[in-house]
Amino acid sequence: MNIVVVNDDGWGSAGIRLLAKEMTHMGRVIVIAPDGPRSGYGACISVTTPILLRHVEEHDLNGAEVYTTNGTPADCIKLAREVVLKDQPIDLIVSGINHGSNASINVIYSGTMGACLVAAEKGIPAIGWSINSHAADVDLHWLQPFLLEITHHLLEEGVPPRTCYNINAPVGEIEGIRWTRQCGGHWTNELDPIEGSSSKEYVGAWKLGGEFVNDEPDAQDTDIWALDHQLLSITPILIDLTHYGAL
Amino acid sequence: MNIVVVNDDGWGSAGIRLLAKEMTHMGRVIVIAPDGPRSGYGACISVTTPILLRHVEEHDLNGAEVYTTNGTPADCIKLAREVVLKDQPIDLIVSGINHGSNASINVIYSGTMGACLVAAEKGIPAIGWSINSHAADVDLHWLQPFLLEITHHLLEEGVPPRTCYNINAPVGEIEGIRWTRQCGGHWTNELDPIEGSSSKEYVGAWKLGGEFVNDEPDAQDTDIWALDHQLLSITPILIDLTHYGAL
């Protein structure tokens, strides 16, 4: 079994190291990760710049091979198919473990999930993993036993066409697993002014920040509700964005 | 009426100039566009770099105001809401006219549509326009009369929650308008090696290219089918990506 591991936090983050190591119990693991943070990249692809690939020596990952790229998480999928695993099937792509939730609307912004959308486009089963904390040293040991168990289960069930999975884990003890839908939500107060940045040349400069607003706080079938109740959330994601109800 | 015009080809492309000029017949127009090409950026946001905003003097756009940014198409929506139109309502966001089709799976890669997804997240009506040619000097005059007509129609109908529109126009005479769904499709042969680029430091370097494969060539209700038959395609796009059928 050929398993490709990607992420958007970049190679070396605790989340991708754990995920890669766990996956070696299922098959041959090839890590292809950005060489630095690509949070918020969505399904961005490198149209205007060359995509470089580097091999990295790693001896602490149960034999997983590691590559890094200056490209995006979405580019990693293309490098996996056409360069590193050229002419070999890819049986599974796992993305993450992202440091930070990708619940609700964040699926469109997430590089972690962007890579999964691209995998789904190629017909490759893909699972995105995120934990509800941005801390680099977040405690992942509560999540660890679920990584192989859920992956096995989803592959055995069979992944529907044009579909991938968005899995979000709470921090701390996991009290159950819930199938969920994407919660309605939006971001506000997103731009923090950088003081003293305005000039003759620029109107100003801002740092991206923001507050997430849950638009459905009372709904009990959403990914956010699951996270708020110490449940691991699994949302099937469809890459056909047509609003059939509106057609 | 406050109308924000964005794109991913960058300020100065023929498509955005025409769209901005036409929209001045409906209300006050503010253009906020990337300062260069951002094709393939999807809903990418600038998490790791400051976002700068510049005012541009323009006297040939029926009074439209113009700003540019080093940021992404998605960032443009945030700048519109929180900086340029701070405390004022935005009644409509139009994106494009993109030089190149955004039919089928390209909705996830498209910066033009990425901006629309973000607008839909904020509850702002948004319409993405694309024409099926990458030529910088593509003849837009066949499309021009539809810009105001369709915009009026969609706003009068009312935009459903969490929805935006992906409109793709054929090149040349437009023989009708069709409501469509997103065609199944995928990309292949995407990485073109850059000759002589491998080194001790890199495995290699690639340019992003690729061939689009239509997975549903016989379906007659898709965006691609409409384009192939000289019809202007309108696809309603939902930002809830949950695969309800799989739940």
Image (cartoon, coloured by chain):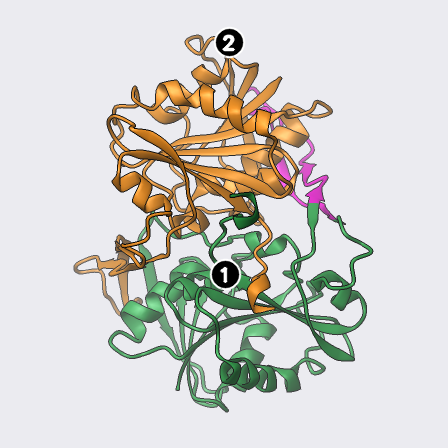
Chain colours: A green, B orange
Cα separation between marks 1 and 2: 43 Å
Q: Label 1: chain?
A: A
Q: Is residue A15 above or below residue A204?
A: below
Q: Which mark is residue B107?
A: none
Does the segment drawn in magenta span residue A200? yes
Q: What SS does tag 1 mark?
A: loop
Q: What SS does tag 2 mark?
A: loop
Q: Residue furthest left?
A: B195
Task: Name the quadrant of the N terminus of chain A.
Answer: bottom left
Total marks in image: 2
Q: Residue at x 70, y 63 (%)?
A: A223
Q: What residue is disc 2 on? A: B63
Q: Is residue B200 above or below residue B22?
A: below
Range shown magenta: A187-213
For residue A206, side relative to residue A31 (left or right): right
Q: Amino acid at mark 2?
A: Gly
Q: Which class describes the residues within 10 Å of circle 1: few (<14), some (14-19), or many (20+)?
A: some
Q: Position of residue B176 (x, y in %)?
A: 33, 30
For residue B17, side relative to residue B90 (left or right): left
Q: Residue at x 63, y 33 (%)?
A: B124
Front position in the image: B197 or B118: B118
Q: Amino acid at mark 1?
A: Gly
Q: Position of residue B201 (x, y in %)?
A: 31, 67
Q: Which mark is residue A36?
A: 1
Q: Position of residue A106 (x, y in %)?
A: 62, 54
Q: Position of residue A214 (x, y in %)?
A: 76, 51
For residue A229, side relative to residue B21 (left or right): right
